[in-house]
Amino acid sequence: MAREYSLKPRRVPRVESKYRRIVTEIPAPDSLPILERLHRLGSSFDVASPAAIDDCLAVGVPPERISYGHTIKKRRDVAYAASVGVTRFAVDCPEELDKVAEAAPGAAVSVRLFHECGGADWPLSRQFGCSTAEAEQLLVSSTEGGMACGVSFHVGSQQRDLATWHETLGVVADVFRRARERGARPTLLNLGGGCP
């Protein structure tokens, strides 16, 4: 596990290390020793529930290294995350953006972009994400609401077609460009995962 974690930065070699943050999806709920080991290695964490936030905090992960990556959240869960210092949230619709804006003022949001996930052993395309036009509007709305913003995507688990990232990054670049033309200021990019 430690060896695999140490290889992750090499998978995105052209990004300066000061801009690169390795984020691990939190392991299964009963895996606190793994979570603690990844924390000691310097990982940040993508969580999907208040319980996962609590697990991260329990092993000493600072809240600024926790991202609430699930795009469907109860308002009270967003408020709880904000109350313990979590400031990064994923959204894929205006209703979720409104929840974050109201319950976590000043938070940063990653707009989850829909992806077909062709070539992945486990496609995640039916679960989350919005169209490019919706993502563009959410970026504009985020900026208008005073939130730092960007885009996230996931190419599917165990993605074997490396061109998928290249193609998707081209789509993201277009979304950023169009959103900027409308006054948005996207600065964040979350590549999701999917490396076999």
Image (cartoon, rainbow, N blue to C red):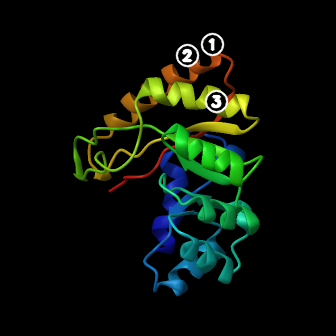
Distance from Cα at disc 2 to Cα at disc 3: 13 Å
- Residue 159: x and y in percent read 29, 49
Taking 179 as reference, is 165 above or below it? below
Depth check, mark 1 against mark 3: the one in front is 3
Label 2: how many Cα within 10 Å (few below 14, some 14–19, many 20+):
some
- Residue 120: x and y in percent read 25, 49
- Disc 3 residue type (three-letter): Ser
Q: Are marks 2 and 1 in contact (CB under 8 Å)?
A: yes
Taking 117 as reference, is 64 above or below it? below
Q: Which residue is mark 2?
A: 178
Left/right of residue 14 with respect to residue 58 in the rendered view: left
Kindly identify the residue that appears in the image at 63 percent across and 26 percent down.
Answer: 140
Secondary structure under badge 2?
Answer: helix
Q: Quadrant of residue 66?
A: bottom right
Distance from Cα at disc 2 to Cα at disc 1: 5 Å
Kindly identify the residue that appears in the image at 39 percent across and 37 percent down.
Answer: 165
Q: Quadrant of residue 41?
A: bottom right
Q: Are marks 1 and 3 in contact (CB under 8 Å)?
A: no
Q: Which residue is mark 1?
A: 181
Q: Quadrant of residue 76?
A: bottom right
- Disc 1 residue type (three-letter): Glu
Secondary structure under badge 3?
Answer: helix
Q: Quadrant of the C terminus?
A: bottom left
In depth, the one of 110 and 122 nearer the eye is 110
Taking 116 as reference, is 122 above or below it? below
**Extreme residue toward the top, this view:** 181
Which mark is on residue 141?
3
